[in-house]
Image (tube, rainbow, N blue to C red):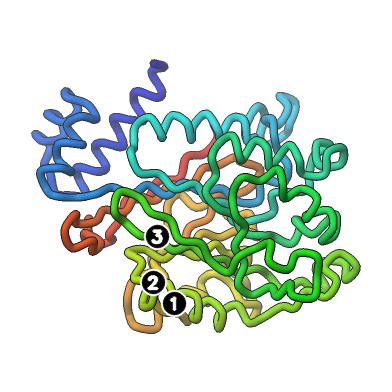
Amino acid sequence: MPKLMTELKLQNRRDFLKKVGVGTAGVALFSNFGFEAVEYFLKKNDLIQLTILHTNDMHSRIEAFPSSHSKYPNQGGLISVGRKINQIRTEVENVLLLDAGDIFQGTPYFNEFGGELEFKLMSQLKYDCATMGNHDFDNGLEGFDKMLPHANFPFVTSNYNFDNTILKGKTKPHQIFHKNGLKIGVFGVGVALEGLVNKSNYGETIYLDPIKKANECASLLKNDEKCDLVICLSHLGYSYKGTKVCDKDLAKNTENIDLIIGGHTHTFLDKAETYMNKSNKKVLVNQAGWSALSLGRVDFFFGKNSKKQHEVNDTAMISKNYQSF
């Protein structure tokens, strides 16, 4: 195993043990015994670990940027991030892989194949779910619809009404996943299309208030479906100076959402940030840059019996975004 990966694993163990209150001696002990020791700790404390991996704004970046690129030489790309995803899957039992939109547009691969390659690779990597970004409309509703058979994963979007379009019934407002006895609800919200996307590309799509729809979906998933965790895939954007609705607004003006995975603004965060929602409860917001230059990761821990989030360092999670593979 390359030295860099060994050091990364060691640091992850140290971070975890510090957050759950194991001292320096414990770090040394766990480091000597490896990931099996972490698994033993989880078992002993009756905890289930759920790892959320996520991307956004990949923009058809299949391969890394060329070596001549002024800012990101030999970095990024779905192939590269896929190696990291596969590595983490060998280390963690319960993984959910999500994308927050703008899969299309940005390289000749999209111009030539219209998104087929992107969807096929994401399917091979076993993405669980994605939402739509504004650039996913770039070949029109017909272009997106033509590519859907290549995606072996659902698209969720709650605030785009496609009833009068070719996409009617082909996306979902939400999706529920089951992992090791846990029930996870995922829904999506998208950015306003008018003025951002050519009208001919979204046709009779009706844009609905994302905060209102988010509250409806989150309440259904948490209160009616009894989900242990509710995740919003958002393509609204992380933050703006004006009044345009963003992920921070979404976090503060909703209830029942545990994690918002964002896109659209290409924001690189080192780790998820914490905000207080309408009920004064914590909601996490994360975003992983663009062009698969970063892979977002948030780990949640649940009690096996109660299925309630276990407070780890008063955040109920460990968050780490991997950048520049």
| Residue 48 point in image, percent of width and height | 24, 49
The residue at 70%/75% (across/down) is 161
Query: Which class describes the residues within 10 Å of circle 3: few (<14), some (14-19), or many (20+)?
Result: many
Q: Which image quarter is the C terminus in? A: top right
Query: Which class describes the residues within 10 Å of circle 1: few (<14), some (14-19), or many (20+)?
Result: some
The residue at 69%/61% (across/down) is 170
| Residue that badge 2 annotates | 225
Taking the image as shown, residue 17 lies to the left or right of residue 255, namely left
The residue at 38%/29% (across/down) is 90
| Residue that badge 1 annotates | 220
Q: Is residue 222 visible?
A: yes
Query: Which class describes the residues within 10 Å of circle 2: few (<14), some (14-19), or many (20+)?
Result: some
| Residue that badge 3 annotates | 184
> Mark 3 is on which residue type?
Ile
Separation of residues labelled 2 and 1 (CA atoms): 6 Å
Is the Cβ of the residue at disc 1 closer than 8 Å to that at disc 3?
no
Q: Earlier in the sequence, mark 3 or mark 2?
A: 3
Label 2 SS: loop
Q: Earlier in the sequence, mark 1 or mark 3?
A: 3
Label 1 SS: helix
| Residue 30 point in image, percent of width and height | 16, 31
Q: Is residue 237 visible?
A: no
> Mark 2 is on which residue type?
Glu
Asked if residue 144 is positioned above or below residue 111 in the image, the reply reads below
| Residue 212 point in image, percent of width and height | 55, 83
Quadrant of the rendered structure where residue 137 is? Answer: bottom right
